[in-house]
Every structure is written in structure tokens, then in C-alpha cells.
Amino acid sequence: MTTDALTSTAQSHSGRSLQGRTILMSGGSRGIGLAIALRAARDGANVAIMAKTGEPHPKLEGTVHTAAAAIEQAGGRALAIVGDVRNDDDVVGAVERTVKEFGGIDIVVNNASAIDLSSTSEVSMKRYDLMHDINVRGTLMLSKFSIEALKNSTAAHILTLSPPLNLDPKWAGSHLPYTMAKYGMSLTTLGLAEELRPDGIGVNSLWPCTLIDTAAIRNMPGGQKMVQAARSADIVADAAHAILTRDPRSCTGNFYTDEQALGEEGVSDFTTYSLGAPEDQLVRDMFL
């Protein structure tokens, strides 16, 4: 997507900004998480990235340090934290370092996630445990340990990259272990939105309507061809920005798609996000 296209899309809510806000994000060294971080950085936000990738990965581009450099180049302030969202001490330390560096936390983005689309009979329990430790436990833990800091913000949000709770048996039957892990993230949104409503903390989920171009997709068999029927991660980043600049007291408990969040800002043309295929030929994402 061109800079002009991004600017045009952002104009729909140009009166709202993340300038001076502090974001703590799990993952984010690449892909959708990094796109969300860079969109916030263009406003002048502070972004703390906690990710395991402190050293270059043999197959995936980007580390927590290259992400931090990109955030600062985009206009934000960055804090690179090498840590594992499965580790209690790492998460507590990330919260404490973010508060010490930036004076507080306004936004938590639960972006870290593991995927394995194996059936129940084929999945290894090691992979099952990995998905639940990162997706469910990691989301709950990062949110939990950030609550006290969020209570001190006048614009506190928790945003989790997870799907609407769709109980169509198709999704559980297709890949039960992964569905359980992603729905666990969404149940965290549902529960925390209600639990933290009296504190004025907005808690929402966001999910793309279509396949998104990421390194993980490109590295899959046939992935280079698949991304031609995908959209840029910028659509999720712009949707996240729209949600995170809303009043958390009235914007909470929602399971947004990227199209829905941007549609509420008056955006109806999503062709600028597409990477080649016509809109009617894009690969739709799971769970919708």
C-alpha cells in the first residue's frame, strides 16, 4: 500500500491520535504486530515490544531490536524487551520496565500467537501445550499483570488479536486444538471486558476478514502464491488504530473484524490493501 493510501484511510479518524500513549505488545517483531506498532509510532506513541526473537531467525526476518529501530524511525519511542510471554517473570519484568521507561501503560496488545492446524488425532501434545501457553495463558497473563498500570490511564485499552466466538461446528471440527486456543483468547476478551468495565478499561478483539501477508504465510508450502490473494497487514494496523483511539468506556466487549472497525470510520473501499487479486478472489480468513 502506498503512503498516500495509508494517509487517506487514516483521515477518517484523523482527529484522534495515539500521540504520547504507551503501548505494551507481545510479539511484534514482524508481521501484523509490527504493522500495528508502526501505525502507532507515526502518531508519536511509545511502544514496548516484548518478543522472544532477540537474535536473527534463520527463516523469519526481524528481531525485537530491528522492530524497535523501525518504530523510532517512524516517529515513536521504542523499548525492546527480549522475553517469553509464557514465562511469568518475563511478563512481570516487561510490565515493570515499560512503566519505568515511559511512566505508565495505556494500551496492551496481545499479539503473540502460535498456530498448528493439525487435527486432534495428529497434533502432538507439545504443540497443543505451546498454543495454549502462548495464546491463552500468555494473553491472560500479560493482561493480568498490566491491569494496575492501566487503571492509572484515562484512555486504557486491551486489544487481542483473536476471532469472534463462532460456535459453528465447522471450526472446531477442522482444527480443534487451534480453535480452542484462539477461542480461549476471545473468552479472555469477553470476560475482561465485563470485569474491567467499572474501571473504564476497554477490552476488545480484532480479526482480519481475509488472509494477511505475513512471513509465516510466505514460508508455508505455496505461500508465495497464497499472498497474492491476501491483503497487506496495514488494514489490521489501521483497524487497530481506529479501535485504540476510541473512548474505552463506550468501546468495550467487541469482536471487530478489520472491515467492521474501518467501516465504522467511514471506510468502504478496501482495494488499496489488496496485493493483487480482485476483492471477490481474496482468501477469506478462518472463523468468520
Image (cartoon, rainbow, N blue to C red):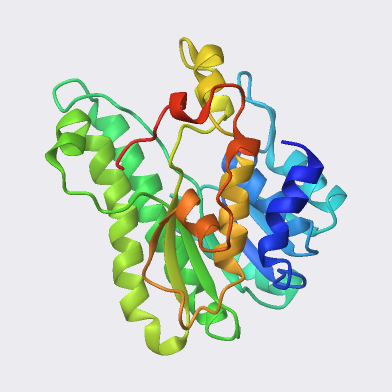
Q: Is residue 268 left or right of residue 82?
A: left
248 to the left or right of 20? left
Q: Residue at x 80, y 64 (%)?
A: 44
* Residue 232 seen in the figure: no
Q: Residue at x 38, y 33 (%)?
A: 115
Residue 6 place in picture, x, y as percent: 73, 47
Question: Could you tell me which quadrant the C terminus lies in?
Answer: top left
Task: Report if residue 58 is visible in the image.
Answer: yes
Vertical placement of 144 versus 175: above or below? below
Q: Residue 275: percent from the left, percent from the top?
A: 62, 26
Residue at 26% from the left image edge and 53% from the top image edge: 165
The mark total stands at 0
- Residue 257 place in picture, x, y as percent: 43, 51
- Place residue 244 in its image quadrant: bottom right
Residue name at image x 49 percent, y 46 percent: 112
Indicate the position of residue 233 as horizontal and vertical percent values. 60, 39
Q: Quadrant of residue 189?
A: bottom left
- Relative height, residue 273 to residue 111 (above, below): above
Q: Farthest residue toward the bottom?
A: 198
Quadrant position of the N terminus in the picture: top right
Residue 238 as seen in the image, left or right of residue 133: right
